[in-house]
Structures are given as structure tokens and as C-alpha cells.
Image (cartoon, rainbow, N blue to C red):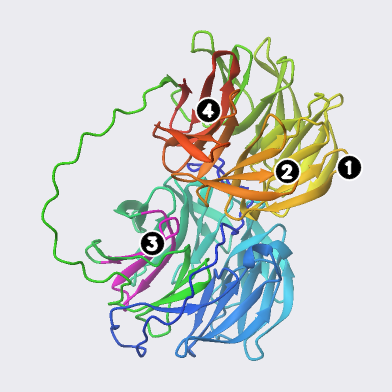
Amino acid sequence: MSRLPQVLIALTIGATLAVGCSSPSEPGPISASTPGEPGDGTVTRMALPKAPLGIAVSPAGFAYITQPDHGFSGGTLARVDLNAHAITDAIPVGMVPSLVIFNSERTRAYVSNQWSDNIGIIDVASNRQIDTIPTLGDPFALALSPDGRTLLVTTNVNQLFKIDIATKSTLGSVALPATSHHIIMDPRGRSLYVATRDGGTVMEVDWRAMSVIRTFTFGGRPQNMAFSPSGQELYVANELSNVLHVIKLSTGTSSNIALAGGGEGLALGNSGNDIYVSLVFSGAVQVIDRRTAATIRLIAVGGIPREIALDYTGRDVLVSNENGWVDFIEPNDSLVPPPPPPPPPPPPPPPPPPPDTGYTRVGLGDGALGVAVSGDIAYVTRPYANMVARLDLRTDNLTTSFPVGRTPCYIVFNSTGSIAYEANQFSDNVSVIDVATNRQIATIPVTGDPLPVAISPDDNNLFVTTNANRLFKVELHGDTVTGSLALPATSHHLLAHPNGNLLYVATRDGGSVLEVNWHTMTVVRTFTLGGRPQGMAISADQNELYVANELSNVLQIIWLPTGSITAVPLASGGEGLARDADGNLWVGEVFAGLVQVVNPAMSTVTRTITVGGTPREVATDAARHRVLVANEAGWVDIIR
């Protein structure tokens, strides 16, 4: 299960790749030049459907590129001729193939089949998957020992596994603080480096002994890594901190190079002189001079650029784009034409409008994540402190904080406000809280790391999802799990329908919302939205379901009688969502530090409040016509 940036939840629990998918504009060769030349100034583009992701390049002049298709169809591995820029074979593999690597002889390739819970073994001579290695959990990142006999792999059970390829047996494992999407073996084959994505760290692991040597703490979301030509520096792209970390391995010290957006893919090109970073949320590739740390170019490729691999020429790079293509970038290439001469200076702009200051801020001293309101009180989870804070809404003062489990996440009251239930992500349980005494009086164990919770209208059943990619139903009279349902991806938000029969499950990286009959624990309907569906709310007449989408930058409206879907554009990706008594929708935009108010009847944004930080969950204070927004930067905003 993924955790917040800086070792907490976040946004990804169950690491899966499926983010928003949109139809690309007709990609085709923009230009071409022969291997080894410095480039003709423009990028060559090749259409590659089904959301390409992982890339492995052979010196023989071809590449294997995974095509996960967000799990909508069986996964394939495309074989691409790097000179002709053409697909020469499509190899069926498992569901959601993610990353792919070759052995040193290029006779075998290994692909992580994420939703099939196995590693596919590819015979390169015949271009077919000849065997699989089962894994515990959904596999993602891969590396090989220098002799090619041992496979290192991470899965969404937050473990690094060492597997003997010949026998398929697990030789050892290391617990991780969060799921890892990228691992890399050092050039000498002595240490393995593990980027723990939502753990905010890079771990240096002795892969032979399966023990942690050092941990480098960065916060944000460390993603792909690459070594300098000397092997003395390790570069780490950070997806949320918008920097490239440079670790000097001899001393363990690090420095940062600013990025123009969140970095995911990373490779050295131009004979090791340039660093290429894919800016996944910005649709660009940033090119950095390795020696001076200066940005040379920012190439606007569009779409969702993911992984980067060095071409067999040693100079060029390949960039997979989730929107349906691969870009081939040479050292001098850019999609951006030379700028025209600067125009004359414009007249001074009018003064900006006064900021929207219609809120009161209550400081916590550390991060806030979940928030729930009952009558005159609010409970706010403090995941960094392992506590829940109580806020008196009559005075807007914090009256107490009390301990719960590790990394408390989302929280919900029962209908009378006498009991609250709160998910402790790293304790693998749900706290039962007596509101009168502000005390945890019991815990409910669950399988995996829990994050969202919801309660049935009759207060008899609690619903919770974990990074085991399952929905659990807990009967509250005995605090026992009485049913479960497999999910296509981990869910971060649940919503109980007022009719007492249905539950809505946003499958985040699955890009869908499931309508579940919670009595029978069966799926009634699936609404495919793409992107990352997060917080949900339902209209007063129960005809419309509202869904904040974190990657598609829209608020989606599902007309429940027919299942039709419309969208309202937002300034950025939405996570928390609440509906006030007037029917307005309040969306916390996690990457932009904004809260936007949407009138669903008019499908328009009516107000934008700049709160800064990282706004997370949202709740309404109906008695005072206000909205509360928990902010991971260390406060709660009470908006009028």
C-alpha cells in the first residue's frame, strides 16, 4: 500500500500504474535521423497503443516495451525495431505488465505482470513468454544479480524479495516502509538501491544478506534512479518534491537539482553527459547537463511521459508515454521551435484581486489527513504523531489529542456521534474511539494496511479497504470481518449510499468506481473514469454521484439512473470532496494547494481558495455552514 509523501499514505497504496488514459493525437514520425548522429533538432514519435510503460533496450537494436492497457485487456510486450521505429512482434504476457529487464546475455527478459502476481520469463529468440515465477502480491520493480541467477522484485505487500530463478524459490525478503516502484543494482553488483516511493526514502540494501545498509530520507515520492558514469553518484527523480536528488555515495550526502515538475523516469544520455527526466504531471522531458547541473532544454512532449531508457547507440533515449506513443530523443532534439524575437513590453497589468481570505486556520504542529464532523466537534487525524485531535467547532480551538495506532488515516463517526472509527495504516487495524472520553477503547484487525472507512446508515456495519486490494465488511456488534470483495486496485475512498444497500468504492489507480451491494458483497456496476478517482459525494436526491479525479483534473458527475458521466474542469487534481447543505461541492486540490467550490447544477467552479500546503480530506460543518479542510502541511482550514 502506498503511503503519504514523507512516509505516510498517499496516494497510492497498492502500487499500480493505471493512471488517466486519453486518446493521443495521431502520433507519427516527426522526423528521423540515423543512429549515432547528434540529432536533427526534432523528436521522432512512434505510435504504441495500450499505455506503454516499461522499456528494456538490447544492443542488437531492438527494445521490449510493456503495454499494460490499464488492465482493460490482456497485457502485451511490444518488440520495437529501434532503427525502423516499428513494432515487429507483440508478445502476450500477464495482466498489467509494468517493468521489463534483460539478462546480461539478452537471451531472457523478465517482465513484472502486476495484476497476475507473477514475473513473466521471455525467451528472446522466439519472442514468447515461456514461464512465470509467482510472487506474493502485485510485482512492479525488477533487478538481476550480476550472474543473472537471482531476481530481486518488489510488490505491493511492501516487501523486497530475492528469488532463485532456476527453482522459483524465495531466498529472502526485506520489509519496506512503503511500496517501491523502482530498484537499481549498483555497477559493481554489491548493493541494491530501493526507492520507497510513498515512504520518501531510498534504501541501500546488501542484496546477498538481504539487510539494509543505509537509508537516505528525502520525503516526497522518490521514483526512478540512475548512476553517474563513475558510479560514485546516484541520481533520484522525485515525483512530488520536484527535484532531482544527487547522492554522493562515498559520504552519504546529497544535493538537489530543481525540476520543472514531478520526475518519474530517469536515464543518462548523450554518452553520459546529459540527464533526462520525465516530468509525469507536466507532459515534458527535462534535459540537464550532468557536469554543471544546468537545465539545457525542456521538451514539451505532452501526454503522460513515464519511463526513460538509453538507446543502444549510447546517445539517444526512449521515453514511453502513457497516452499511446514512444518518443525517440537525440541529444539536440526538442519539440519546441526557437523562440521568436521578444515583443515590446506590455503595459503594466491591473492589480490582482484581493485573495480569498474567508477561512480560519487552526495549527496542529504536524500533518493533518482525515477529518470528520459530528455536531459541535471534529476529529482530525495526525498521521505523523500517531494521534487524533479533537476540535471544538463552537470556539475553533483544539481541546485535546489522544494516541491511536501507527499512521492514522481516515475517520468516520456513527450516526449518533458517540463512537468514531479510524484506520491505522501501519498497525493494520481500525481504532474504535469513545467520543465522550476521547479514548481508543478497542481495535479491529484487518488484512493489510487500511486507509478509508465508511459506516452503514444503520450503524451496524463498517467498511474498510486495505493494500491487499480488498474491501472488507465488519459487523460492529462483534467487531468481526464478515465478508470481503477483491478489487482491481487499492481504494482510497468509500461512500455508503443512504439507501442502506449500496457502497461506492473508488479504485484509485484502477481508474474506476465500483457500485457494490454490501449485503451480498457483489459488484452491481462499474463506472470507468480513468485517471485516479478519489473522494466522493452524493446529491440530496441520490441521483448524482460526484467523484474528484486526482490526475484527470476534473470533477466527474455520474447520473446514477443511467450511468452516464459528465465532467467539470478543475484547476488541478482533486482528492478530498464534500457536499454542503446548499448542494455545492468542495474539492481539495492536493498538488496545487487550492480548494475549489463547484456548483453541480451549472457545472461551473464558483470559488477558488488558495490555502497552500497539501489539502487532503474535506468535511462539512453543517450547523455553522462551514467546511473543514485537513492540510498535510500542519493545519486545518475552516472555510466560511
- Look at the numbered disc 3 and give the secondary structure of its residue: strand
Residue 617 in percent (x, y) is at: 55, 32
Numbered-mark total = 4
- Label 2: which residue? 560
Measured Cα–Cα span from mark 1 to mark 3: 51 Å
Question: Would you say 178 lies left or right of 358 here?
Answer: right
Give the label on residue 520, or none: 1
Residue 638 in percent (x, y) is at: 48, 21
Residue 149 in view, yes or no: no
In the image, the segment drawn in magenta is 261-290
Q: Residue at x 75, y 34 (%)?
A: 497
| Residue sitting nearer the eye, 542 or 329 | 542
- Label 3: which residue? 234
Vertical position of residue 221 compared to residue 55: above or below: above
Mark 3 or 2, closer to the camera: 2
Judged from this view, the residue extending furthest toward the front is 602
Query: Which badge, 2 or 1, is on the more N-terminal residue?
Result: 1
Magenta stretch holds residue 273: yes
Q: Residues within 10 Å of mark 2 (few under 14, many from 20)?
A: some
Query: Which badge, 4 or 2, is on the more N-terminal residue?
Result: 4
Q: Amino acid at mark 1?
A: Thr
Place residue 506 in its image quadrant.
top right
Residue 301 in view, yes or no: yes
Query: Which badge, 3 or 4, is on the more N-terminal residue?
Result: 3
Measured Cα–Cα span from mark 3 to mark 4: 31 Å
Measured Cα–Cα span from mark 4 to mark 1: 38 Å
Q: Residues within 10 Å of mark 4 (few under 14, many from 20)?
A: some
